[in-house]
Amino acid sequence: MPDRLIIALSGGVDSAVAALLLQQAGHRVEALHMTNWDDDEAGYCTAADDWQAALAVAEALKIPIHRVSFAAQYRAQVFKNFLEEYAAGRTPNPDILCNREVKFGVCLEYAERLGGVALATGHYARRVSDAMGTHLYRARDLNKDQSYFLQRVPEAALARARFPLGDYLKSDVRRLAREAGLPVYDRPDSTGICFIGERPFKAFLGSHLNAVPGDIETLDGKVVGRHDGLIFHTIGQRQGLKIGGSHTGNGQAWYVVAKDVPRQVLRVVQGADHPSLLAKGFSTDAILWLTVPPASPFECALQIRHRQSPVGATVHWDARGAQVLLNDPLRGVAPGQYAAFYHGDHCLGGAVITAPAGDQ
């Protein structure tokens, strides 16, 4: 009898085509639609529309569909961390934590209770199993590749995951959906953090965290303005500082270069080419390996954000963390970001950045 696979059916075109491909490959497919956010404030949450879209896909494919809410787990294991990181002046990525804790955590466990041998998703990534274990690789469509978001999913969970879209281009996925008559073939892709949606980010964050105003200072301590809360600013930011160039007379734009959280001070520099905006390296916490760890030091390519072009680096590591030396300086390196390490298309693992080298 064919394997029973559970597809995490979101209501979007990617998971719909993933289900279609599994079905065409002869698997017994059942759908699982999960809700991770239950706040429909001001109509920003799309959960109701997503459920109706998932229902329509399940009906078109004639597969059973289950519905479950992981909102409580999401708030406890992802959203709580998100708020704590912002309050501490760091730059979190909740989507990475959601994949680890929810999609390939409690959702995977739920899929197994439904009798599934694996949980499939619409992620653009590839997994390869061999005698050494299960490995994570970039997708064929490098523009859509989501391996960066999967860097914290443990190998044991990856072994029970399936990524049917790993060898497909996004254009192929849209075409397959249209040819199969799937009702979501032209549904727009979701963007941004799931619990924020299209709502104003500053207003949302300010409703959950206490914003403390403070001074904006240059690196030599000169006060050039006031901010309304460190939580509203990110490393490398230019817009929204409300500082004119007249403080120095050169008229160049100001950029955020660091946060002094104990003093509630935002530190800025002037000019897009200021050397303090470029990090020559950074330190991390302990690396979560998805393969046999290479000897230290090792050379690799790395990313600190989705769709960033990989940059070469040398990594010195031990059980406590890593020191990363970049081949070329990198903009926007901030504590709290995730760094993913690659050899070619092979994702070796990832770690959280604790400080840029030469942090001001």
Image (tube, rainbow, N blue to C red):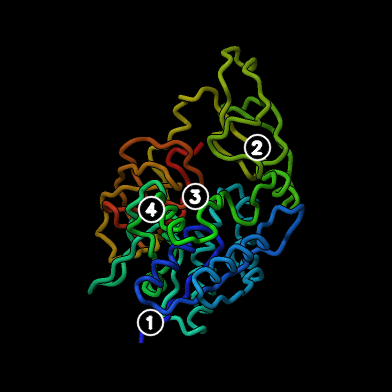
> CA–CA distance between discs 4 and 2?
49 Å
Marks 3 and 1 sit apart, C-alpha to C-alpha, by: 38 Å
Q: Hey, what amino acid is under mark 1?
A: Asp
Pointer 1 residue? 3
Mark 2 near mark 3, Cβ–Cβ under 8 Å? no
126, 158: nearer the viewer: 126
Question: Is the N terminus in the top left, top right, bottom left or bottom right quadrant?
Answer: bottom left
Few, some or many C-alpha atoms within 10 Å of disc 3 (few <14, some 14-19, many ≥20)?
many
Q: Residue at x 52, y 68 (%)?
A: 60
Residue ranking furthest to the bottom: 1
How far is the residue under mark 1 from the one under mark 2?
Answer: 57 Å
Disc 4 secondary structure class = helix
Q: Earlier in the sequence, mark 2 or mark 3?
A: 2
Residue 245 versus residue 326 in the image, above or below: above
Q: Residue 41 vs residue 63: left or right?
A: right
* Dot in front, 3 or 1: 1
- Nearest to viewer (mark 1 / mark 2): 1
Q: Amino acid at mark 2?
A: Val
State the residue position of label 2: 265
Residue hosting label 4: 172
Tell which tag, 2 or 3, sits nearer the viewer: 3
Q: Which residue is mark 3?
A: 337
